[in-house]
Image (cartoon, rainbow, N blue to C red):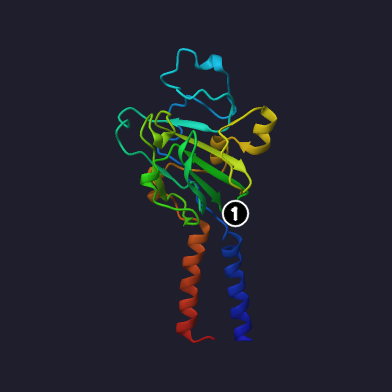
């Protein structure tokens, strides 16, 4: 009878632990995500006319619906390393060169049907490789040097997009709005919905439910063993 009561108590105790076991951390892919300038935003249509007089800033004149947000560097970051981070737990499905981007990282996000794309990354700075598992907030690489092979000839910035599915996909622009909407989602809106936070404040993040109940479970198990109840 005593053991039955203990098992019943333990079951009630573990219920909230498993209920919140899927709690997952989310971070922005670059510091100052919400305040950085953006020369190109998600779903913005770019024609050849929009580049006229701005050729120095946009040497590669791609046309179509922009499938990501471009996070520009802040003043003073021109010659400084600017890291990018895993927005959540997941697996690196690609880390290598892609024409027009220079370096690209694709992150297959855990417990999520989407993949995050990081473009214009310095491949020499990669801290991960294809197949690696990563944790939320983990540093992946730094931005490539402006107007070099590391950025595909582009300015120094982060091209960050989120697309539907787990396959390898690189397109930075879509020819039509329907194609854009069927493959891509608004990255800023999605991260905000997930409760993403700035990486600089990661150390002060409140404990998650899974962390709290894991700690309580370990204490309870230790107590039961010491009490020799089983």
Q: Residue 152: name its quadrant.
A: top left
Judging by the rendered image, the residue that carries numbered circle 1 is 111
The quarter of the rendered structure image containing the C terminus is bottom right
Q: Residue at x 68, y 36 (%)?
A: 182
The quarter of the rendered structure image containing the N terminus is bottom right
Could one spot residue 32 in this view of the protein? no
In the picture provided, is 229 more to the left or to the right than 174? left
In the picture provided, is 222 more to the left or to the right than 194? left
In this rendering, is residue 142 above or below 69? below
Q: Count the marks: how many?
A: 1
Could one spot residue 107 in this view of the protein? yes
Whole-percent x and y of residue 28?
A: 47, 41
Name the foreground residue: 87 vs 108: 108
In this rendering, is residue 77 above or below 224? above
Name the foreground residue: 96 vs 40: 96
Mark 1, secondary structure of its residue: loop
Whole-percent x and y of residue 13?
A: 57, 69
Name the foreground residue: 203 vs 44: 44
In this rendering, is residue 220 above or below 214? below
Q: Residue 176: name its quadrant.
A: top right
Q: Residues within 10 Å of mark 1 (few under 14, many from 20)?
A: few
Whole-percent x and y of residue 68?
A: 54, 33
Whole-percent x and y of residue 142?
A: 38, 42
Q: Residue at x 64, y 32 (%)?
A: 180
Name the foreground residue: 139 vs 62: 62
């Amino acid at each position: 009878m005593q053991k039955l009561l203990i098992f019943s108590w333990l079951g009630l105790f573990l219920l909230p632990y498993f209920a919140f076991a899927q709690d997952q951390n989310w971070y922005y892919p670059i510091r100052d995500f919400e305040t950085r300038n953006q020369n190109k935003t998600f779903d913005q249509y770019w024609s050849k006319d929009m580049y006229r007089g701005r050729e120095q800033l946009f040497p590669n004149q791609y046309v179509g619906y922009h499938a990501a947000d471009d996070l520009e560097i802040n003043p003073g970051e021109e010659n400084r390393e600017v890291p990018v981070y895993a927005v959540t737990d997941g697996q690196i499905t690609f880390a290598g060169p892609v024409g027009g981007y220079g370096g690209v990282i694709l992150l297959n996000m855990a417990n999520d049907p989407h993949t995050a794309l990081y473009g214009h990354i310095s491949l020499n700075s990669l801290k991960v490789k294809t197949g690696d598992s990563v944790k939320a907030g983990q540093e992946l690489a730094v931005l490539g040097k402006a107007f070099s092979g590391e950025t595909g000839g582009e300015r120094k910035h982060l091209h960050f997009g989120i697309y539907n599915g787990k396959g390898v996909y690189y397109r930075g622009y879509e020819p039509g709005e329907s194609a854009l909407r069927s493959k891509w989602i608004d990255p800023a809106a999605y991260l905000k919905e997930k409760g993403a936070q700035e990486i600089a404040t990661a150390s002060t993040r409140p404990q998650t439910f899974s962390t709290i109940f894991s700690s309580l479970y370990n204490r309870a198990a230790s107590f039961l063993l010491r009490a020799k109840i089983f």
